Amino acid sequence: MEIEKRLHKNRKAKTAKKGLTATGPRSRMKTVTDQSVNGGTKAHMQTESSSKREQILNAAVVVFSTRGYRATLVDEIAQKAGVAKGTLYLYFKSKEEMYLEAFRENVERLHEQTLERIENARSTWDKIKAFVIVRLEFGETHKDFLRIYLSEFVGTLMGRGAWSEQLRAMLQRESDLLRDLFRKGIEAGEVRDVPVEQLVSMLHYTVGGIMTSRVTEIRLTEVQLDPDMIVELLRKGLGPPER
């Protein structure tokens, strides 16, 4: 039960994380202790550091998406983030680390949102629709990251890129999730028994094409497919034969 394992693991990670956040019980105890020692200075510095790191990563995504990794200069990221160049190196060792961490955090956020939406869906086709919707919504609200994601996705599939193995591992989870959904759908009789790998590729390329058209504004027609249309077409073609 691969999906259930991932959901359980995700919930445990979030529970553990809550204990360390500003709203968690452990954090409150720690903050009280800090305040009794130095008036909350340590807690404030930790919050400020986390905010600064996020600020830098957000700026990095914007610059990398417009300039590309190779052409991007660390100075440009510092300028976009509104910090001194030396400040960047307090948080990241190199431009490469900044790029990979910006990519990882956004992919992690997308993955978590996907798991949450799938958990709340009932049938196989509702779960597949959730998978599609989350990607299209995320692409709309994170267009700068989407440009990087699509570029690396294509590069990883083609086996190129400086970090193809690392990125492949991140992206592989999404394919594994789809495989699990389709296999369970076949077992439940909701999906026709066809090669799962072809289903996974078909859905990836369909969603990827729509995301690409929204970023580049390149469209073959003026008609845009929405998640309902995509999943309904798949359901009619791949659902069990009507009796």
Image (spheres, rainbow, N blue to C red):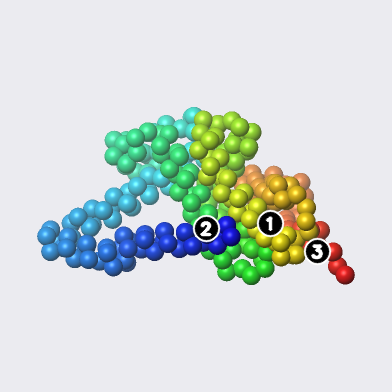
Tell me the number on the disc at residue 6. Answer: 2
Which is nearer the eye, 69 or 124? 124
Give the residue pinned by disc 1: 183
Give the residue pinned by disc 3: 240
Q: Earlier in the sequence, mark 2 or mark 1?
A: 2
Q: Earlier in the sequence, mark 3 or mark 1?
A: 1
Q: Earlier in the sequence, mark 2 or mark 3?
A: 2
Residue type highlighted by circle 2: Arg
Asked which secondary structure carries label 3, the reply is loop
| Quadrant position of residue 36 | bottom left
Residue type highlighted by circle 1: Arg
Residue ID at (86%, 67%) = 242
| Picture layout, residue 29 above or below residue 94 | below
Which is nearer the eye, 42 or 158? 158
Asked which secondary structure carries label 1, the reply is helix
Which is nearer the eye, 243 or 160? 243
Judge left or right: residue 226 versus residue 67.
right
Q: Quadrant of the N terminus?
A: bottom right
Provide residue 46's location: percent of width, then percent of height: 26, 53
Provide residue 9's location: percent of width, then percent of height: 47, 59
- The Cα–Cα distance between marks 3 and 1, rounded to whole angstroms, is 14 Å
Q: Quadrant of the C terminus?
A: bottom right
Local crowd size for mark 2, using a 10 Å CA cut-off: few (<14), some (14–19), many (≥20): some
- The Cα–Cα distance between marks 2 and 1, rounded to whole angstroms, is 16 Å
Judge left or right: residue 56 versus residue 114.
left
Residue type highlighted by circle 3: Pro
